[in-house]
Every structure is written in C-alpha cells, then in structure tokens.
Image (cartoon, grey):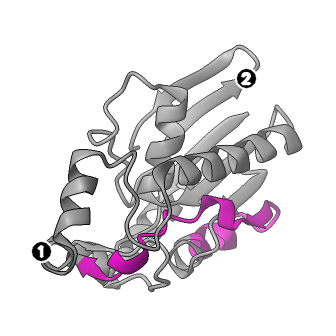
C-alpha cells in the first residue's frame, strides 16, 4: 500500500499553542490556505481511498482534496482522532501549570506514562491509532494509494510504531504538506517527508 499522510491545517488553538486533542475546532484562515496548497500538490495523485479522523479540522482540510478526487472511497474514523487531553483541553502550558502543577510536572517528566486528568493515556492512544491503521491495511488493496488526514500526535504515534528508534518529539509533520510511506509484507519504508 502506498500511504500518504498529512496533518490538518492550522487552527487558532495551534497559533495560541493550546492543548486541544478532542476539542472540535475549525481551521483558521491560514489553515484553509494550507488545505488548498496541499490539495494542489495532490491534484494529479491517483487516490483510491481517503481516510480522515472524526474531527472538524480534518473534515475541512479534506474538503478540497475530496473535490479533486470524487472517485476515492472516503472513510471517517475516530480511531485516528487526536489524543484526549482531558482537563487540559483548551489551555496552554502556562495555564495548565497554574491549574494542575503537580500533574503537569509529572507529565513533563514522563509524558508516555502520565495521563492528563480525565484524559487519555499515551498507551491507550497508541493502541487505538495503531489498531485503526492495521484495520485499513488489512481492508484495502495492497496496490491501493491511500491518503490519511489526521493530527500531529496521531501521525507521530504511527511513525514511531514503525520506526521506534527515531525521536518522537523531533518528528515533524508540517501543515500544507504530505508524507509518503510504502507499507508491505516486507516492512514499512519512508519515501518522502513533508512534500
């Protein structure tokens, strides 16, 4: 399977550096432009399937791409939603530290082991995302070209399930770009990053 992945366009919460995994916000003006940019990049790509998370920001990002690829099968799957930050949703780092200093420091020290209050643990999130990807890898044709539109945490988690030696926090999936992987029985190969 040729798998193209991309992050949704920018939102005001990105610009304000807020945690907003499950908060369902729209793209801002920059995000709409980023969606149009990547749509133009993908215009001549033959897509068999388009998968997106169940969030408004991926729906809005996918809109111009779907218009250019009307014959692609569309799947909406909450398995690819961003991680829930629970009580920290809609807050920036300074606000979280002021409201929940102990848990914030514990999370900074061990982000893969400590969950935000009423939020999702990284391990639960990782299982959810990787199971969703496995489902489509098994469901879609090995010869298919598939586009996944998701979130930074989702894409980083998939990437690091495939390439565990890479630094999680240094892996960037830029808005307005897409990356390309080859998934096969022989393994997973990165073909292009942030095209």
The answer to whether one can see residue 32 in this image is: no
Which of discs 2 and 1 lies nearer the camera? The answer is: 1
Residue 57, x across and y down, in percent: 50, 77
- Residue at 22% x, 72% y: name it: 17
From mark 2 to mark 1, how far is it between C-alphas?
Answer: 43 Å
Mark 1, secondary structure of its residue: helix
Q: Point out the stretch of residues depicted in magenta.
A: 62-91
- Residue at 49% x, 44% y: name it: 157
Residue 36, x across and y down, in percent: 46, 71
Residue 58, x across and y down, in percent: 55, 71
Q: Is residue 81 magenta?
A: yes
In the rendered image, the residue lying farthest to the top is 186
Q: Quadrant of residue 104?
A: bottom left
User: In the rendered view, would you say 143 is above or below 147?
Assistant: above
Q: Quadrant of residue 30?
A: bottom left
- Residue at 64% x, 40% y: name it: 3
- Of residues 34 and 18, the one drawn nearer to the viewer in this rendering: 18
Q: How many marks?
A: 2
- Residue at 43% x, 75% y: name it: 86
The answer to whether residue 140 is left or right of residue 24 is right
- Of residues 59 and 55, the one drawn nearer to the viewer in this rendering: 55
The answer to whether residue 23 is left or right of residue 111 is right
Q: Answer with mark 2 or mark 1, whichever residue precedes in sequence.
A: 1
- Mark 2 = which residue? 184
- Of residues 60 and 44, the one drawn nearer to the viewer in this rendering: 60
User: In the rendered view, would you say 97 is above or below 190?
Assistant: below
- Mark 1 = which residue? 94
Pointer 1 local density, CA inside 10 Å: few below 14, some 14–19, many at least 20:
few
Q: Quadrant of the N terminus?
A: top right
Q: Is residue 74 magenta?
A: yes
The answer to whether one can see residue 55 in this image is: yes
Q: Quadrant of the C terminus?
A: top left
């Amino acid at each position: 399977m040729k798998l193209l992945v991309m992050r949704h366009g920018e939102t005001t919460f990105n610009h304000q550096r807020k945690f907003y995994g499950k908060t369902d916000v729209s793209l801002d003006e920059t995000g709409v432009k980023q969606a149009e940019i990547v749509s133009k990049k993908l215009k001549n790509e033959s897509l068999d399937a388009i998968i997106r998370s169940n969030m408004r920001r991926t729906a809005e990002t996918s809109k111009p791409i779907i218009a250019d690829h009307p014959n692609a099968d569309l799947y909406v799957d909450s398995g690819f939603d961003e991680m829930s930050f629970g009580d920290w949703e809609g807050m920036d780092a300074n606000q979280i530290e002021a409201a929940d200093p102990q848990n914030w420091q514990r999370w900074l020290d061990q982000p893969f082991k400590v969950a935000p209050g009423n939020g999702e643990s990284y391990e639960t999130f990782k299982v959810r995302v990787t199971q969703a990807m496995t489902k489509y890898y098994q469901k879609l044709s090995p010869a298919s070209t598939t586009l996944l539109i998701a979130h930074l945490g989702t894409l980083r988690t998939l990437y690091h399930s495939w390439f565990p030696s890479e630094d999680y926090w240094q892996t960037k999936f830029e808005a307005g770009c897409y990356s390309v992987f080859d998934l096969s029985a022989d393994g997973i190969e990165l073909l292009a990053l942030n095209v």
